[in-house]
Amino acid sequence: MAELLRSLQDSQLVARFQRRCGLFPAPEDDPREDGAGPAEGAARAPGADHRSAANGKGAGAPANGLLRAAAPQAYVEKYIVKNYFYYYLFRFSAALGQEVFYITFLPFTHWNIDSFLSRRLVIIWVLVMYIGQVAKDILKWPRPFSPPVVKLEKRVIAEYGMPSTHAMAATAISFTLLISTMDRYQYPFALGLVMAVTFSALVCLSRLYTGMHTVLDVLGGILITAVLIVLTYPAWTLIDRLGSASPLFPVCAIVVPFFLCYNYPVSEFYSPTRADTTTIVAAGAGVTTGFWINHFFQLVADPTEALPVIQHIPPLTAGMLVLGLTKFMVGIVLILLVRQVVQNLSLQVLYSWFKVVTRNKEARRRLEIEVPYKFVTYTSVGICATTVVPMLHRFLGLL
């Protein structure tokens, strides 16, 4: 078993997959200079830092090289693409596990398809992502070594690898959607299963193609998500009724997530993991609070009142498409406006409170500034998406 796990964590396995898909490192690159950092001297390559991390793991040393935090921002790897079909397929698939997808798919589902489904998807997504992000900073397993792997993404290169949260999110979203709709809408179950498996597989394979995860990272993410779905499934009905909870529910829905974000595991160097986790958890807190506001003040009909529901999926018409896109554009514009205004205001307050120079990008990374401003911003976004935007739709006659 130990030998199998080591083979699944081997960077050469990822490199072979990339080569079979037509992705190669540029031959003129010098591996010894791969990933050279800023002009501060001999900054070590990310691949070399990962090697020291692997050697230190389990030996009492830090599980990741401390110099790696300074190098990734300037790291640009040259590569050769010999199969553009796989290149664009997996780059697009990788985007399906990133913020740009969730900030469009989840609100669109809420505003145009089924608010009951969107609420369940958001809660399961937040739970899975928080556990996955925390597991990364507890396990401290390195990402694949480069070389031999070609790395196509720079932003998350400073994060740890195990488990793949892209794989976790894709598996959670696709199979939660399948399980939640099979008794709510009439459609061929086999078709839904194929779509769920295809979506998950594409996102998982994209993490190998982009060189950001080992096979073990991806399989670990899938397995953890499957266990979480099985363990939480009996409580999904209870989760659906959170909107009708006690008047004190919003306090718990905000205080507990903020506490979890503020006490996020400490890393030896800065990475975007804590900020991303705070963004996700805060959005979930805002969405659940927004649903409670809708129920408590009777702003919209409770989506759980009509359960169980078996509906035929209506055919898509031009009018439905135009209406859906109009509602989506109105909602996204308002969300982006709220995000920008709240972010600027919260940063100004925090900068003033902690006497920090305005526009100091490094100050944003401090715990006492990063977590509060991210949490306030995206909690506001969640509340806006579930409460304010539907009211605006009604006011504009779009409902």
Image: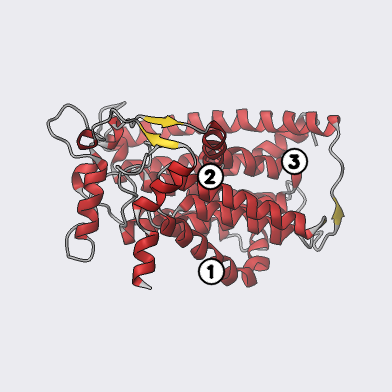
Q: Quadrant of residue 44?
A: top left
| 172, 21: nearer the viewer | 21
Give the residue type at disc 2. Gly
Q: Is residue 125 above or below residue 91?
A: below
Secondary structure beneath dot 3 equals helix
Mark 3–mark 1 CB contact (< 8 Å)? no
Q: Is residue 288 visible?
A: no
Secondary structure beneath dot 2 equals loop
Outermost residue, left side: 41
Identify the residue at image location x=19%, y=47%: 66
Q: Which residue is mark 3?
A: 112
Structural distance between the alpha carbons of marks 1 and 2: 20 Å
Identify the residue at image location x=57%, y=44%: 382
Q: Which residue is mark 2?
A: 97
Mark 3 or mark 1: whose residue is earlier in sequence = 3
Q: Which residue is mark 1?
A: 227
Structural distance between the alpha carbons of marks 2 and 3: 21 Å
